Amino acid sequence: MASPVRHIAAPLNTLAIRRDFPVLQQDIGACPLVYFDNAASSQRPTAVLKAMDDFYQHDYANIHRGVHTLSQRATDAFEAARARVARFLGAQRAEEIIITKNATEAFNLLANSLGGLLQQGDEVLVSELEHHANLVPWQMAAQRYGLTLQKIPITETGTIDPDDVRRRLTSRTKIVAVAHVSNVMGTVVPIREISQLAHAAGAWMVVDGAQAAPRMAVNVAQLGADFYVVTGHKLYGPSGIGALYGRHDLLQKMPPWQGGGNMISEVFFDHSTWREPPFRFEAGTPPIAEAIGFAAALDYLSALSLDAVAAHEDMLLQKAEAMLRTMSSVRVLGAPPHRAGILSLVMDDIHAHDLGTILDQHGIAVRAGHHCAQPLMQRMGVPATLRVSFGLYNTPDEIDVLENALHDAKKIFGVA
Amino acid sequence: MDVRELYQELILDHGKRPRNFRVLNAATHTAHGHNPLCGDKLVLHLVLDDGGKITDAAFQGAGCAISVASASMMTELLKNKTRDEAQKLFTYFHALATGETTPAFPLNDTDTARLQALSGVRNFPVRVKCATLAWHTLKAALEGATTTSTEGA
């Protein structure tokens, strides 16, 4: 878990960084684009675009099949990308990384494959702040395999209390599934403490790292994660690619969830045998160029240093929180002890969608709505929020643009 | 496109102080409308007399200024319209909001002003569904359906 005291890396040179992102060099209407929708999807640097373009122009072929040169090059590049993801997450070996099409697919893989290993009546503990991707697949698995879904409620401040998790763990708890960073409030959840408790109770720890991995250095061993999920498009890489880290000994026990080419060892007409992990979990042709782009994005991010990115987003967050505190009629959701790069706000008498439209007129891209976290919205008693989420290319000046736009919205709606 | 053309005085007023915002116990037709992408929800109540005339219309729900104002103005427009006129009004408004050519429909000046105010959404494509949610719910209610969704029922 990153914390302010660890931020010793050199500050980011956002001026230079912004030149790496062609999409940022544009106006929306008459205003320069302010991209504050990074939690939904970030933008990608030219290094990623170039890596994919080069691959398509020179090396593309299907992988793990052909005996020809291009197929060999493509296979090598794809497997190098897998190894790159492993290094990024601190995995022991490349075989612990399964390439998926996104985070959602990774959770569906887990719910289907792990679900089959459990007994009827076993419990899955899921937190109240999860994105639907880390909730709905478990609901479906619970129905299919006769499991019981249990909720870890959030505290008043919007975090998860490990003591509360301890009280909810039983001898039947087999899986604890929690987000590392909330996609709505930015809460940094104390994963290490929770995974220690989960392991002591004999449960496996599943962590949704979709929002954490772009914002802080992640090491799955230090976190005690048995499974850790990331997605490329939030990590400055392409869409259509994600990755699932799984502990090697666990992956070996797990049955496949999708059948088809590549995942089999031998096929007879009436039955088949499976390859070793990770291939057992990768049926069909994967997103090949996307994997190359994903690896390039991780190279880019790592070269800047995740500690520097975390410090940068901390600085932006502090400025935004200070600005919002001085503004009347605005409420920031939750007050967790540690927040990373994301916050949600509601305004008296102005619905989030109306705010989103007015901000767009100022060139500001934000997300308005339930953020695929409806149980959390129900808990917080709001139908929708406006979410501001930072990336490594955002600047403090852009928060002034946000402040100005919020004042404009209040003026239009006649809110004090 | 100036955002003030979307948030006209009339819209803001109806958004803040929606008319006919109540339950109609005497309702003969009730339907629930839902936009699952944004979470907006409303329930529409209609009272139709034996001759098929709408004698009362009311709604309740939560949503953005556009969706609340649209529902509010729609309930005002519906009173004393026949079922047939209400269906034509739906077609008319749908065309107006999506920027298509509107079919001929006789309207008094007040109703014309209301619909013109709402038609500002046609320049904000992502907000069209906010304005049409109440109207799709109306269509569902008239057709005897109890629920409708902007993303396919």
Image (cartoon, coloured by chain):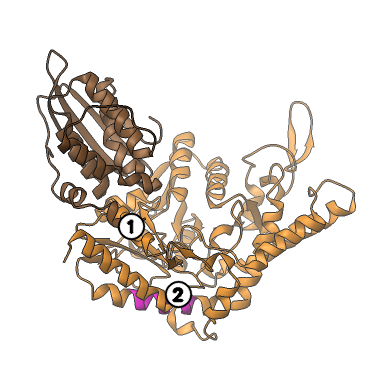
Chain colours: A orange, B brown
Residue closer to the observer: B3 or A279: B3
Mark 1, mark 2: which one is toward the viewer? 1
Q: Name the spot of residue A189 as percent of width and height, x first.
A: 41, 65
Circle on res. A313 = 2
Q: Is residue A145 left or right of residue A416?
A: right
Residue drawn at x 52%, y 84% as measured from the top left: A11
Residue drawn at x 13%, y 48% as measured from the top left: B17
Which kind of residue does numbered mark 2 sit on?
A: Glu
Residue closer to the observer: A392 or A132: A392
Q: CA distance from mark 1 to mark 2?
A: 32 Å
Which kind of residue does numbered mark 1 sit on?
A: Asp
Vertical placement of residue A93 versus A242, above or below: below
Q: Which residue is mark 1?
A: B2
- The answer, for residue A154, to whether it is visible in the render is yes
Q: Quick check: is A312 in the magenta stretch?
A: yes
Secondary structure found at label 1? loop
Which of the chains bears the disc numbered 1? B
Vertical placement of residue A164 versus B111, above or below: below
Crowding near pointer 1: few (<14 within 10 Å), some, many (20+)? few
Quarter containing the N terminus of chain B: bottom left
Residue closer to the observer: A104 or A254: A104
Total number of numbered discs in the rendering: 2
